[in-house]
Image: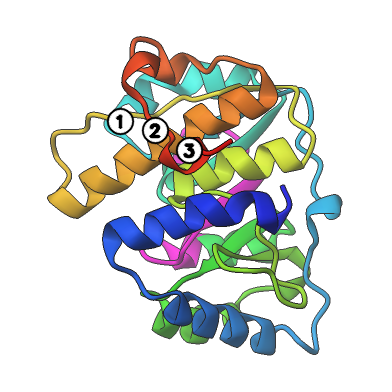
Amino acid sequence: MRYEEWQPAYEAILSDFGFEPAADERARDVLAELLESERPLSVDDIDLSGTVAICGGAASLVGDLDVARRADSVVAASIAADILRDAGVAVDCMVTDLDKNPGTARALTEAGTPVAAHAHGDNLDAVREWIPEFDAAAVLPTTQAAPVGPVVNPGGFTDGDRAAFLADACGAERLVFPGWDLDDPTVGRSKARKLLWAERLLRWLELRREEEFGVLDGRRDRIELQWLAGE
């Protein structure tokens, strides 16, 4: 996805949450600086072909493990990586903004497993602390702002929907979604709002791919994509 395509959605997210783009840009620039003498991954270095399981960290993932096992590639969003590894399911890529299990991300990079490490306005301290600990050769640095240097923007906002957009960019033929709960009653208000955006962005990705995701069954008619209204 070109940044020009993503930008209207990004601006709608900023407006909804009251975020400042300058904070995202600062974190992005720090991420780029930390990797300027390294050779991190690009999107073209990651092959996620065939059926790709986009694994969320909801409690339902334990019951959905067979969906991940049957997939050709497995992308884990945040803590899903721990659940999958504990169950003996290999992870082909992890997507994280470093807020829950950065030690797992470090271990995966050391083993040569790609980790899409995301910088945004609220995690600058984590970026500074953890990125130097990772094996940069297995890091795909990402941003939700405009890409700079080695830092890319395949699209997406939360770890989960960013994982889906990344899989799309890396050649996925079909996407399945074990471990997702868009109506999770255990999350707080802010996370619930983020899940609403995950829903919207996945619907947009459906339209772009001309594919329907099971995770959105029964929800499509109520989803509005405001940033596309003028198209």
Mark 3, secondary structure of its residue: helix
- Residue kind at label 3, given as amino acid type: Leu
Asked which secondary structure carries label 1, the reply is loop
Name which residue lies at 28% across and 60% down: 17
x, y percent for residue 229: 48, 36
- The answer to which of 175 and 190 lies nearer the viewer is 190
**Kind of residue indicated by mark 2:** Glu
Which numbered marker is on residue 199?
2
Q: At x 40% / y 49%, what residue is drawn?
A: 79
Q: Are marks 3 and 2 in contact (CB under 8 Å)?
A: yes
Give the position of the C terminus as an image quadrant: top right
What is the CA distance from the residue labelled 3 to the residue labelled 2? Answer: 6 Å
The percent position of residue 3, horizontal first and vertical second, equals 68, 58
Q: Is the residue marked by circle 2 packed among few (<14), some (14-19), or many (20+) residues within 10 Å?
A: many
Whichever of callouts 1 and 2 sits on the residue coming sooner in the sequence is 1
The one nearer the camera, 20 or 101, is 20
